[in-house]
Amino acid sequence: MSPDTGPLSTGSGPLGTGTSEFPARAPQRLRVSFEFSPPKTDVAERTLWETVTRLTPLQPTFFSVTYGAGGSTRQRTHETVARLKSETGIDAAAHLTCVGATQGEIDEVARAYWDAGIRHIVALRGDPPSGMGGKYSPHPGGYENAAALVAGLKKIGNFQISVAGYPEKHPDSPDAQADLENLKRKVDAGADRCITQFFFDADDFLRFRDRAAAAGVHVPIVPGIMPVSNFQGITKIAGLCGSKVPAWLAELFDGLDADVETRRMIAATVAGDLCRRLRDEGVDQFHFYTLNRADLTFAICHLLGVRPPRNGAPK
């Protein structure tokens, strides 16, 4: 990928002059998963379930549901995860953090998930109650970090556990090596999968994957994909979580603040091209941060050849 012109500069992509590299259907089984947030209002709840209905036919490996700062959405997360699994039959993963609770309180939440038949947890340190960008400190009597949380969860039950990884390092890490060592501790504690923070440069992910393997991290590393539905909003989030926004991406969205349809077409193409590049490098799993909206994620999956089965047959 050219740092100057970005992913759309090649002649082989959908906007290039050569043959499109987007398949009619995925040549091999690409696995996808989708992240949602628990709804806060009746309108948001309707939107979420419309999104679930739209994405379920893509047969994702799992859905995941976020957990608000300081556990502020604990009950809504539980209800959403339980309903997802019950109504779709697809594995549903609950996010669980170390923030704002003692080990005993977090263990109680985990046991409630186990008793409800939820066997997949996304174990995170979590953001401080003040939100992203605030200073984190362990809760008195709580789990110190995500590695400790993973170890604690494994004592409760044989959960499948996903953890976070950071191709451009976590903002609180002093350097990339310390960040990688933290990921290794989470995996050594029992994590089964790493889902990355979103990024826009495929090379950042590929370098991270290679460095992780060299450090002895031998679990799947799944790229987190964030479709750019609102460029200004993504820029703000990226600044807080340590993801860089390339100049070429800003240029693509320049002047489109009032042009929703063009933004959406560009967003789908950019993310689709990123996923295609990763697929060509051997990546066969993608985790989408949907923001509870289906259209962009569905379009990107379609570009990758991940589509609903025909006549009930597997893809």
Image: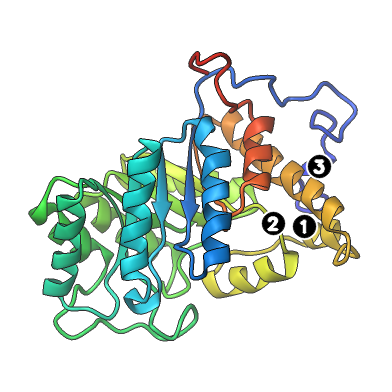
Mark 2–mark 1 CB contact (< 8 Å): yes
Mark 3, residue position? 8
The residues bearing labels 3 and 2 have C-alpha atoms spaced at a distance of 15 Å
- Secondary structure found at label 1: helix
The mark found on residue 38 in the picture is: none
Quadrant for the N terminus, please.
top right
Q: Position of residue 50 (x, y in %)?
A: 57, 48
**Chain-order first, disc 3 or disc 1:** 3
The residue that disc 2 covers is 228
Q: Which amino acid does label 3 sit on?
A: Leu
Q: Which residue in the protein does label 1 denote?
A: 249
* Residue 210 falls left or right of residue 246: left
- The picture places residue 169, in percent across and down from the top left corner, at 47, 63
Please, is residue 215 above or below residue 283 in the view? below
> Badge 1: how crowded within 10 Å, few (<14), some, or many (20+)?
some
Depth check: 268 or 145 in front? 268
- Identify the mark nearer the N-term, 3 or 2: 3
